[in-house]
Image (cartoon, grey):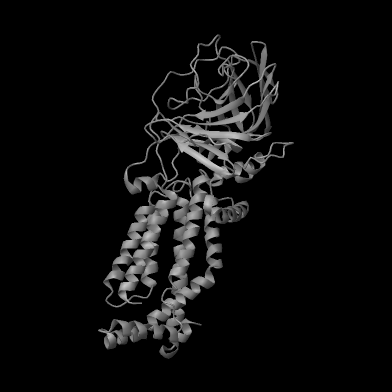
Amino acid sequence: MNDDRRLMLAVALSLAIYLGWSFFLMKTHPPKPPPPRAPVAESTARPAEMPVPTSPSVVPKEKERTPSRPEQLVSLDTAEIHLVFSTRGATLVHAVLQKPQYRRRVDGRDEPVDLVRGEETGRALLAEYQGASWPDDPLGDYEAKQEPSAVVFERRSAGVVLTRRYEVVAPYLLSMTASVSGGSARSLEIGFGSSQPPGASAPSGGLFGRLARSYPNVATAICRVDGKNESSASNKDAEVTLPAPPKLGTVEFGGVDERFFVGAMAPQDDRTGSCRVKSTAGGAVAATVDLPLGAAPSPSRTFAVFLGPKDLDLLQRASVLPGSKVDSELSSTVGFGFWTALCVPMLRVMELFHRALPNWGISILLLTLMIRLLLFPLQQAQYRSMEKMRVLQPKLNELKKKFGEDKERLNLETMKLYTENKVNPLGGCVPMLVQMPIWFALYRLLGTTIQLYREPFIPGWIGDLTSPDSYYVLPILMGATMVGTQLLSPQMPDSGQQRLMMWMMPVVMTVFFLNLPSGLNLYIVASNLLNIAQQYFVRRRTRSAPPSDRITKAGA
């Protein structure tokens, strides 16, 4: 391959990497810091243990009202989650995960993950009846009755009895039933709103700032209708509601996504309705499910409510309530998207490795070795082709001297030489193109699945495989091993462009990967080291052959 074509190929690969990362991983919209507001009033009855907030929470205001009596808070605890309900609107105001690994690092300290962060005028699971035959007040005062694994709220309004029942039916899963006795309504709206989580911040400007926050810790409102997801983060200067106008369809779920965690509500009976997402400039997000009630004299609706980590198996089980046949497809919140076909098998293989050796960093290294073994025939063909190119270099130089002025004839004779010796000048590109989808898929895994969240490789150095290497050791090693790979590749004589690309690409890639997950850097470093070992083996084997047999030996 002549110098111009090699340069064009190098530039094309660089552009592919740049555009690939930008297109698939750059869609990031930072929230603005929420403005401060007054804290919620303290409970005067059945006080619940409340998490200490690190910053004021702001949630969408539904309706302003003057409470008739003090708000009461009711707690419901399991081994997995601490739930706090309010008698004001029979709403959920806090959902704190109990397990120690499900925590966030905020201002230098670990804090429990709270998936709701409700305040005085905005809650999760706020119900509003449209076209009600009674004077509906969504934030009306309810009476609370607590059972061993359930909380029942009841409110009487103009002869109508409103009931809301929350029951724990599985880990991180609630059954919520809203029912009316003695009245009717056109539709029921259930809203799930939250403020931004503690520590949510805007990325720095420019490409590298966006790379650093490709998977930012922000809350995003989500809806899934007719098998399609709609989402909105708090990233605008004004209020945003999608879709506009709302579209009628089969509602799978609506809720709030927080990268490794999700809170979602899924209708369980007739799911025909609409779902809209809403975000505000103040940092609040909300999803609202609207379900028609028809002319039923005592309408009711049942929802599955999931509040927990994005564990694929857990979400698949939670998608169907016990005794129900409705699949709410909660597993789609994991967000593998286009890369599902690669992400799921990679995750399952790493889980197998993790059961044998309980360290996710080692699981990534074993995954790297397995993938390299699967790609060994392809890689071996690449390196043999590269060695053939190196062995043929003297003959290519002779052709350049002989036909240097006749470019067309030079190209014809060069391709003839390649054909006679069974050399594919583009063969070296294929293994790299095969590896790139694996990079994207692993990035997706590290950016959304809970299994690797806060999991260390070497304590004191890499304490979280989903976060960047704070010492930048792995990105620098990645760049160094890329240089080593380039040095072992056949070099064209007097090829200034190739030498430039040999140094420029590792530098560019190192800078790109400085703020990407350490788990991804670990995979690439290990893959590059195996790559260097394989190249060295092929080169040594070829050089050990007699000069007359080197082409044959390289292709053996």
The reply to whether residue 304 is visible in this rendering is: yes
Q: Is residue 541 above or below residue 371?
A: below
Query: Along the line of sight, which residue is nearer the eye, 395 or 161?
Result: 161
In the displayed image of the protein, which residue is found farthest to the left? 405
Query: Along the line of sight, which residue is nearer the eye, 477 or 220?
Result: 220
Label count reads: 0
Quadrant in the picture for the N terminus: bottom left
Q: Is residue 9 above or below residue 446?
A: below
In the displayed image of the protein, which residue is found farthest to the right? 323
Q: Is residue 320 left or right of residue 44?
A: right
Q: Is residue 52 above or below residue 233?
A: above
Q: Is residue 522 left or right of residue 204?
A: right
| Rendering coords of residue 144 (x, y %) | 65, 16
| Rendering coords of residue 449 (x, y %) | 54, 46
| Rendering coords of residue 184 (x, y %) | 66, 20
* Residue at image location 47% in from the left, 84% down from the top: 553
In the displayed image of the protein, which residue is found farthest to the front? 295
In the displayed image of the protein, which residue is found farthest to the top? 68
Q: Is residue 504 above or below residue 197?
A: below
Residue 432 figure quarter: bottom left
Residue 486 figure quarter: bottom left
The reply to whether residue 100 is visible in this rendering is: no
* Residue at image location 58% in from the left, 30% down from the top: 290
